[in-house]
Image (cartoon, rainbow, N blue to C red):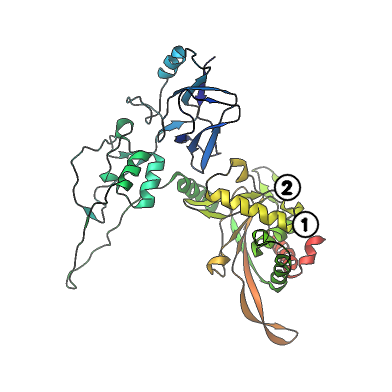
Amino acid sequence: MADKFTMPKLSPTMEEGQIARWLKAEGDTFEEGETIAEVDTDKATMELTALKGGTLLKILKQGGETALLNETIAITGKTGEDFSALLAEVGSQPKSVSGNDSSKTDAKVEETKVDEAKVVETVEPKAEAQKPKTEDGRLLVSPIAARMATENGIDLRTINGSGPQGRIIKRDIESALESPKPKVQSQTFTTSQVFGASNFREEPVSKMRQIIAERLTASTQNVPHFYLTVEIEMESVLALRKQINATISEADKVSVNDIIVKATAMSLVKHQWVNASFQDKSVRFYEDADISIAVAIEDGLITPVVRAANKKGLLAISAEIKELAARAKAKKLQPEEYTGGTFSISNLGMFGIEQFTAIINTPEAGILAIGGASEKPVIRNGEIVMRNMMNVTMSCDHRVIDGATGAKFLQTFKQMLETPAMMLL
């Protein structure tokens, strides 16, 4: 019996998905659990897998087109099966604007606003073509096309959309990238000219950046932050790392951040009020330390989670972080791999940052902002000596963590890094 193949919810914040590409063509058969398409969501490029085997009878959403959650994107069934009745049923249902129905619907679509008055550069005119717009003058652009245009510096006003209703889609941007770039008319100014406000440009915001903006704004507005900073001597950590790496292969080498993750996890299980989250009328305490690690990717930031880091050794933590970070940058993480952490770590030390504050990744109650370790003169046993020192600032949710609670946690964290054997206790 023929079935509808609908757009599933592939991330917690997903409202629509864009077909990146079909891995199967109409008429192709597939097995249970086989991937038949890839979808771009607000977080990553996800795989669509079949819950049961069958034949791809009809593709209703082509590559580059967007579908709302639970909207039918294809029809599957048995080879040669009559699916005309099902096709008629699907055709009678409301479609998103990115579908083949050109009538107006209440479906939410991703649009990119282009303000004709806000232009930095003038481009030599190309063949005149009327750009399809909505009633308020905005161009219709798919999310992936908007992202590609931003990444490659393409002015969307120069693109003729080939999608439904003239919507600019992925293949239009790809065509523009293959074509010779239009010449930009330069302007020269004399020193006697008077300048007003600077010219500027506006670029479309990716779905991921929109979600980041919403979550961080909500965190700063709804969570009472306070901050605690501690300076930690890192000589013992550096010595431990050198000792471990001397005995293992290059691919398995442990980083300072791996040791920080382990020390954080072991400190969390000793301080339950830090390894917790505020739940309106209750406080949720976690038995294990699931550490969210901030990873910078192309469109923003994502936090893959090392589960139960308190129960894992340094080599296991190191290998897991490498694997998660690689898949995060390739946008291949599954939702359960970047949600549900109990505490976060953001490390900017590798960029030369000595100290900073981070915004809490709600509903977690805290986050550590890790600065870089650098040699500084310190007094030891009455003498001035050089030591590698690192600043760590903890952002705390005051609804859960009080000042003394946060200070005690940082005290334990400091002890574990300055005396790594403490992590074994």
- Asked whether residue 274 is in view, the answer is no
Task: State left or right for residue 95 relative to residue 263.
Answer: left
The amino acid beneath tag 1 is Lys
N-terminal label among 2 and 1: 1
- Asked whether residue 312 is in view, the answer is yes
Q: Which residue in the structure is indicated by mark 2?
A: 286
Tags 2 and 1 touching, CB below 8 Å? no
Relative image position of residue 69 (x, y in whole percent): 49, 30
> Element type at marker 1?
loop
Instruction: Give the image quarter of residue 282.
Output: top right
As drawn, which residue projects farthest toward the right?
A: 425
Q: Which residue in the structure is indicated by mark 1?
A: 270
The amino acid beneath tag 2 is Tyr
Task: State left or right for residue 290 relative to residue 154.
Answer: right
Relative image position of residue 211 (x, y in whole percent): 49, 45
Q: Residue at x 76, y 47 (%)?
A: 287
Q: Is residue 354 above or below residue 290?
A: below
Relative image position of residue 159 (x, y in whole percent): 28, 42
Q: Is residue 143 above or below residue 366?
A: above
Q: Is residue 71 above or below residue 124?
A: above
Q: Residues within 10 Å of mark 1 (few under 14, many from 20)?
A: few
